Image (tube, rainbow, N blue to C red):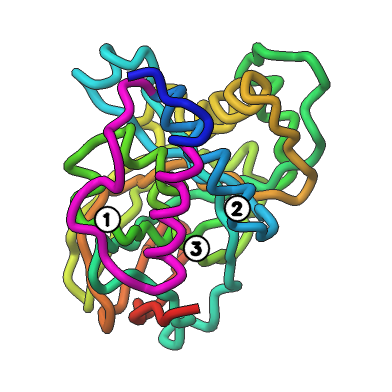
Amino acid sequence: MNLLKNDAAEIAGRFLSARRGAGGLADYPGEFPETLEEAYAIQDAAITAWGKTVIGWKVGRVLPPLSDRFGTDRLAGPIFVSEDASPIGSGPGMPVFAKGFAAGEAEFLLRIAATPPAGKTSFTLEEAADLIEAVHVGIEIASSPLGAINKLGPIAVVSDFGNNNGLVIGRAVEDWRSSGFEDWLVTTRIDGEVIGTGRASSFPNGAIGSARFLFELMAKRGIRLEPGQWISSGAVTGVHDAKAGQTVEAVFAEGYKVSCVLTAAQPQ
């Protein structure tokens, strides 16, 4: 399949219609793309049609053997909504698609300090870190009207905003460069039950590796990153299905915590 521009716009429109209506999609809404490039073309069309301000970008993992097939171990999608974390015990309500897929993912959130240099398409980890001004703890709200989005794999995920529906921003990590935060043990609980643990250092090149990936990908896609935008650097404890009405809590080392309550998305 060689996805044409009008085909990308049509698929994007079907995803957006389901999002606006808070509905569900039983199947991928169109002919399935063959490449990530075609999936990003759908994402670009959807960003334009959605017309909302991009406040950041989520970075997700692509695991073997699909990482070998696609030639990348990560993918990206836009973030349009964020909420500051409330005091522990009264986290904000975050909407998810009750008829689709939903998860709350413990993540480190990196805030961009400066737009990467124009024309630069390759970054060292040190150069990527120099473009970050702060690291926060947080929760990525992974949700899509397409219930089978993760089972269908990276192409489906990229097609629908990277399977993102918001971000909960917690406290800033003090002295993040010397904190060793990538080695912190992180725990995710749903309704008080531990469902996953992990460390960001288990990612290839850690959380800063996610930033480097995003800087290089956006340069290739011709998308300008802005100071103050967020990078949600990857699900530290893995992806765990959840549903509206459940409370998701992410517990980090050094007493850092953040929580939210998943709510059913309403038609817009």
- State the CA–CA distance, disc 1 to disc 2: 19 Å
Q: Is residue 238 visible?
A: no
The label number, if any, that marks residue 166 in the structure image: 3
Q: Is residue 100 visible?
A: yes
* Residue positioned 43% across, 80% down in the render: 267
Q: Nearer the viewer, residue 19 or 171?
A: 19
Q: Which residue is mark 2?
A: 49
Number of marks in picture = 3
Question: From the viewer's perspective, is 167 left or right of 120?
Answer: left
Choose the circle earlier in sequence order: 1 or 2.
2
Three-letter code, disc 2 = Ala
Q: Residue furthest front?
A: 6
Bounds of the magenta segment: 8-35
Circle 3 SS class: loop
For marks 1 and 2, give the one nearer the viewer.
2
The label number, if any, that marks residue 146 in the structure image: 1
Choose the circle earlier in sequence order: 1 or 3.
1
Do tag 2 and tag 3 residues touch (Cβ < 8 Å)? no
